[in-house]
Image: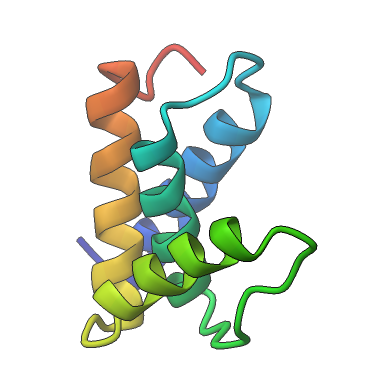
Amino acid sequence: MSSEELDKEFEHAVDCVNAHKDPFPADTLLKLYAYYKRANHDSQRPSGSKPLISAFKTNALFQTRNMTIDEAKQEYIDLVKDYFGSLDDF
């Protein structure tokens, strides 16, 4: 897959997640968060009023530390496809 195709599919997967109204399971949400942040080269530490949630987010980001941007995009896409079964319905 070319870089342009990967970017397009990643953006489509992001749109699918953003359009979804039901809550995601916590483990899926953390993975989506970490892959998205890594894919967008956002290395800022999570902040918020809930230290436990910030700790989980930090751990999720830590687990993606050796991924390239393209690998993170592909992992995000794969996770969204696994969750929804397909991206064709969106």
Q: Quadrant of the N terminus?
A: bottom left
Depth check: 54 or 8 in front? 54
Question: Is 27 rendered above or below residue 73?
Answer: above
| Quadrant of the image occupied by residue 44 | bottom right
Q: Is residue 57 above or below residue 82?
A: below
Q: Residue at x 45, y 61 (%)?
A: 56
Q: Is residue 33 above or below residue 62?
A: above
Please provide percent x and percent y for residue 9: 41, 47
Q: Is residue 18 left or right of residue 9?
A: right
Going 54% across and 75% down the picture, which residue do you hit? Answer: 40
User: In the image, is 40 to the left or to the right of 47?
Assistant: left
Residue at 38%, 25% in the rendered image: 87
Q: Is residue 64 in view from this perspective?
A: no
Count of marks placed on residues = 0
Q: Position of residue 18 (x, y in %)?
A: 65, 34
Residue 73 falls in image quadrant: bottom left
